[in-house]
Image (spheres, rainbow, N blue to C red):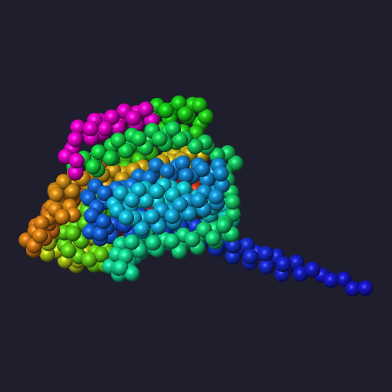
Amino acid sequence: MTTSVPAAPETAAAAAHAAGRRRRIALAVVLTAAFMDLVDATIVNIAIPSIQRDTGATFSAVQWVTAGYALAFALGLITGGRLGDIHGRKKLFLLGMGGFTLASALCGFAAGPGMLVGARVLQGAMAALMVPQVLAIIHVTFPAHERGKVFGMFGAVIGLGAVCGPLIGALLTEGNLFGLEWRPIFLINLPVGIAGILLGRRFLTESSAPRALRVDLIGTALATAGLLMLLYPLTQGRESGWPLWGFVSMAASPLVLAVFVRYECAKARKDGSPLVELPLFRIRTFAAGAGVQLTFGVVSGLFFLIWTLHMQLGLGWGPLHAGLTGVPFSLACSAAAGVSVQRLVPRFGRKVLQAGALIMLAGALVYLWEAGRYGTALESWQLAPAMLLMGGGMGLIVAPITDTVISEVPAEHSGSASGIFNTTGQLGMALGLGLSSVAFFGVVGDTGQPGGAGAGAGAADALRASFVDATTHALWWVSGGLVLVFGLLFLLPRRIRAQETAERAEPAAPEGGAGPEQRQSALVS
């Protein structure tokens, strides 16, 4: 009589290998989604002149192509995170990725500016469903001892998106694949999105929160109405001759936002699930940090738009030339971000962020001086010092700011605080894009509109000169915003508490998805 011994170790090893393979594929899917979102938030800037020429888009339409995405993304972030907690993160992730892919197709096949703006708003809303699930899926997919390495990979992908987004946009636009001009920057998402959906259905693990907060649809509607009442007339007002209804709408916007605040207070008392946890703003550090984030978002949104238009419409550079000119900015930002978090902030605290604001201010002033001195003859190598200063200064701010601001927030509220903080940055960017109507396009005037510059070499030179003048004017706005950021940074704690930093060494899965420092460092056009 013989007995067989089961090969338990081999079976366990095979099962572990299969589980590891499943996790790796799941990670690739969610990281690809995060990469797609970041690239699409930045890739469009480099193609704006091509879009304007091809579709006849007005300046306000150009602003909405970028601001519509940012605004829809910001307003949907917290709601998207809560829907995932309630209905399942895998389900919402796949729904968001499917909608994002569809919206990308609509952008790529847009017949005119109106359709493109609508598709971009849809794209931002779908990103708001998809992106908040990424960190949550990573948390439930990987055991604790593997998350450190996984989050390191997540950060590397974010950094890669910061560098590659503008270059991918430049290559696709200048390459004019199949005669489609700018459209491939959106159509490239189709095969990527379809592959992600198919792999995600098979390899992602479903999860939900045992005690999820309710969705605050009324709060979302009030916030959306209040912000649109401000941003729509701000963006459209110049082209409409600044009509009375625009000023009435902007004046009524704070009243609607005040109703939103009162409703949120009532909602918190009723069921404890407001869209925004207003008591967080009683913490001075968090309130000041939100002010910094909002102001910095305004500066970023304004700067990246005018930078792109200055290089292509003011200096006459092609998309690839402009994209390569931005490489020093991207590299300096990535290098400074790594050094600030690992070495500088633990030693010098908030002084690092203040130094970043001053370095960015120096870069903006150098850029302003060079634009005024060299005019339309400015060369890439002459612009490089300003780009290095701007990028290095931004890296010193965007990487450590979240931990600095949230260091005094109770740990049980860190997820909500991070979500609100992220949303604030996105709203700031949308506001900065809206302010470009006054700070930039108001100086360009009607000469920059399709068909508005006349004909001949003289008119072309006048058009380019008007964009240079508008750039110098807008850079004063950027400089003023950086001075305000520097002042607000004094309200932050001098140092991050060591205990709090250790607790947050492993990132939480905030309601707002990827942190603001990740998205802002990627906004390189």
Residue 228 location, quadrant: top left
Quadrant into which the C terminus falls: bottom left
Give the residues in magenta.
Answer: 239-260
| Chief SS of the magenta region | helix
Which residue appears at 36% of the width and 55% of the height?
Answer: 107
Above or below, 18 against 122 in this view is: below
Question: Vertically, is 285 above or below 472?
Answer: above
Magenta-colored stretch includes residue 249:
yes
The N terminus lies in which quarter of the figure? bottom right
Q: Is residue 50 found left or right of 270 in the rendered image?
A: left
Residue 500 visible from this viewpoint: no
Looking at the picture, how far across and down is residue 133, in whole percent? 50, 50
* Residue 55 point in image, percent of width and height: 26, 56
In this view, the residue farthest toward the right is: 1
Q: Measuring from the top left, give residue 141's x and y in whole percent.
A: 57, 55
| Residue at the image position 33 percent from the left and 47 percent from the top | 68
Residue 235 lies in magenta, yes or no? no
Q: Residue furthest front?
A: 111
The quarter of the picture where residue 521 lies is bottom left
